[in-house]
Image (cartoon, rainbow, N blue to C red):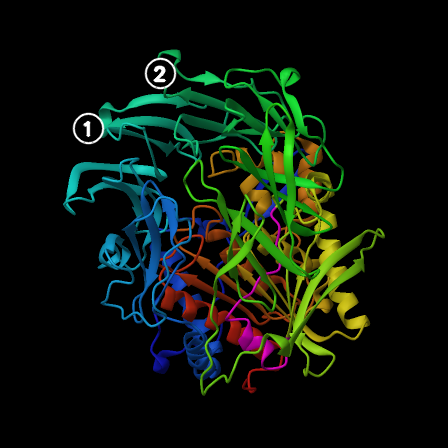
Amino acid sequence: MTSPDASSSPARPPLAPARPVTRTWHGHERTDAYDWLRDPEDAEVLAHLEAENAWTEASTAHLADLRERLVEEIRLRTRETDLSVPSRLHGWWYYSRSFAGKEYGARCRVPVTDPEDWTPPRPAEDVAPDTPALPGEEVVIDLNELAEGHEFFSLGGASVTLDGHLLAYAVDTVGDERYTLRVKDLRTGELLPDELTGLMGGATWAPDGESFYYVTVDESWRPDTVHRHVLGTQQADDEVVFAEPDARFFVGVGRSRSGRFLVIGAESKSTSEIRFLDTERPDLGWRVFAERRQDLEYSVGHAVIGGEDCFVVTHNLTGPDGAVSLAPVEPTAPEDWTDLLPHTPGTRIEGVDTFAGHLLVHQRSGGLTRVRVLRLDLVDGVVDDRLVEFEGEVHTVHAGGPGVFDAPVLQVAHTSLRHPPALHQYDVRTGELTLLKQTPVLSNELTGEFDVEAYEQHRLWVPSVDGVLVPASLVVRSDAARPAPTLLYGYGSYEASMDPGFSTSRLSLLDRGGAFVIAHVRGGGEMGRGWYDDGKMETKQHTFDDFVAVARFLRAEGWSSRIVAEGGSAGGLLMGAVANQAPDAFDGIAAAVPFVDNLTTMLDSSLPLTVTEYEEWGNPEGDPEAYEWIAAYAPYDNVTEQAYPPILATTSLHDTRVMFVEPAKWVARLRATAADGRPEVLLRTEMDGGHGGVSGRYKSWADRAFTLAWILDRLGLADGTP
């Protein structure tokens, strides 16, 4: 991002010229004066974005020292040279390393020396950056080397052949999520001549290590086609294995943990279909496990239970919160599946990882994640059924297993708003839980010593306008004055759950006397599938009502004084909607890559992702009712002549999910329409980033510090120090 010279700082915000275009939809005239800002290659558009950046820089110049201090606080609390807990795969322990002063990390491995020992090797705490972390260390891939010379860098995926000899990895150096794939021989360090472009993420190796499968996207950026590439051949000659014609469906390809089955999934927002290839019987070809039915969602995993192969099917056939069934490893109609875990209202089954003899079930109830481990036998059924328990009502638990099918252990991660992530090893045979590593928060002279007991967290239940109780998670220092200046975060779409977790950068808010709250609004998945269904399509208004209700509750109950709201992407749509509907409830709004012009996007089926989003928002082009319910809340369309709180909108030029034009238009209309003529509305465009913003650890810290400094300023905390 360019930084304008202070001597040329603008005296006033840029005002985009209005060039109205009127179109009629279902009898409604809709005028858009700023859609000309859409073209990222137009010189006038780029000049306008640069002018917005210059105005934002000038308007926040008084926060420059604070931004630098925030970056330093994050850095000093972070162990910059570190490594992850090793995870076992195909005779190797794999782990990631980070290095002080380096933007990116490296993926490394060491050989397994004792096949019977499942305890990950532990390095010394103070390993130097240029020293192997463990004896026999091999650097699989150094991301700093790959990123050299690029302003943006993202690793889309990396996978190793079963024999551990070859690595396929995909990179994006623009931010548009179109990846280029290369293959590295890990025995020699040399790159193979194969180079594939236009991929969606990484690759899935065939068991023989001589070919792999990958996915490409169509013109609307939908992953729609699975290809097979044979090493040493040209990409143009690759076999098309499957192409999905229905524009509502995304496709993906993967391999079972056992390595026996290759799987192609086709999924819309409400329906799924699985194809599989038994690599022990390739003559059978790719087969559909269960034909797609509208509103039937399912996934499959391979398990060997009691010596018998089976598919474990996670599905919504018998209820919206999900169930688990067993089926033979062949095409099987849903009516022939055998129940294992029946549907239980209020217990949402979010996924199942399958192993030889046991299952790892990811579920949630009461707004909290839960990890369940089942040891099975096909004759006797469930032999052992355990929940991996942690205390508290504001925490998050996730689990995963090594890539080894018959592994007797799992890795379980626990965190909360005040507890840094802790990774444990869970022994499936005994139920024993052993701490492997807790993310350190370093003490230093600038921020002092971190003490988890200095903070308190609460689960609040807030009545929304229709009486539904909305959960909210709050963290604040125990010695902070009440009511406290508060950062209120929300999302509320796609059944995505904003579970409570720790953030090092958030300490810079809390230690200045601020509070942080997550509003678990409808449209998310925190309270099960019904919570999601009650905040989408024609009921989307519930998302906004819930968020505003939480904000007003925090003030009324004495928790909060000033409140700044923050959300990104679909959460940015939430920010835009509440800015229109309840501007008095907020002292500032920070909207990252905000989906604020959703009506325009959903009216244009040629734009990226539009058709696939019909089942989330509705189809306003073909359905008059959908047009009306979207038009009733769409942030851009509902900007009115009223006083707005200060707004900071951030975006990226190369974002293909929420294009930069949406916040650019929104800011332009706010400036032209709001009651005071020119409210404090700022737009910051990252000229080298994608949907996730900038890349690189230190750049990301600086990016977060920019927004956090603005938030602290709006909360009246900019002059405080931890």
Amino acid type, residue under disc 1 in the picture:
Gln
Tag 1 residue: 234
Q: Residue 626 lies in what quarter of the image?
A: top right
Q: Nearer the viewer, mark 2 or mark 1?
A: 2
Q: Position of residue 205 (x, y in %)?
A: 32, 32
Farthest residue to the right: give it.
Answer: 467
Q: Is residue 408 left or right of residue 187?
A: right
Judge by depth and name the residue closer to the eye, 408 or 546. Answer: 408
State the quadrant of the C terminus.
bottom right
Name the element at disc 2.
helix
- Give neighbour class at mark 1: few <14, some 14-19, many 20+ (Cα, 10 Å): few
Judge by depth and name the residue closer to the eye, 305 or 176. Answer: 305
Tag 2 residue: 282
Residue 282 is inside the magenta segment: no
Q: Is residue 548 left or right of residue 338?
A: right
Judge by depth and name the residue closer to the eye, 671 or 255. Answer: 255
Residue drawn at 66 percent across, 38 percent down: 627
Amino acid type, residue under disc 2 in the picture:
Pro
Residue 498 is inside the magenta segment: yes
Q: Is residue 99 above or below residue 601?
A: below
Q: Position of residue 351 (x, y in %)?
A: 58, 38
Q: Residue 590 lies in what quarter of the image?
A: bottom right
Label 2 and label 1: CA atoms lie apart by 23 Å
Q: Residue 27 lies in what quarter of the image?
A: top right
Q: Is residue 618 above or below residue 93?
A: above
Residue 596 visible somewhere in the drawing: no
Principal secondary structure, stretch drawn in magenta: loop
Q: Is residue 171 left or right of residue 447?
A: left
Q: Is residue 411 left or right of residue 255?
A: right
- Looking at marks 2 and 1 on the same chain, the residue that comes earlier in the sequence is marked by 1
The part of the chain drawn in magenta is 496-514
- Give neighbour class at mark 2: few <14, some 14-19, many 20+ (Cα, 10 Å): few
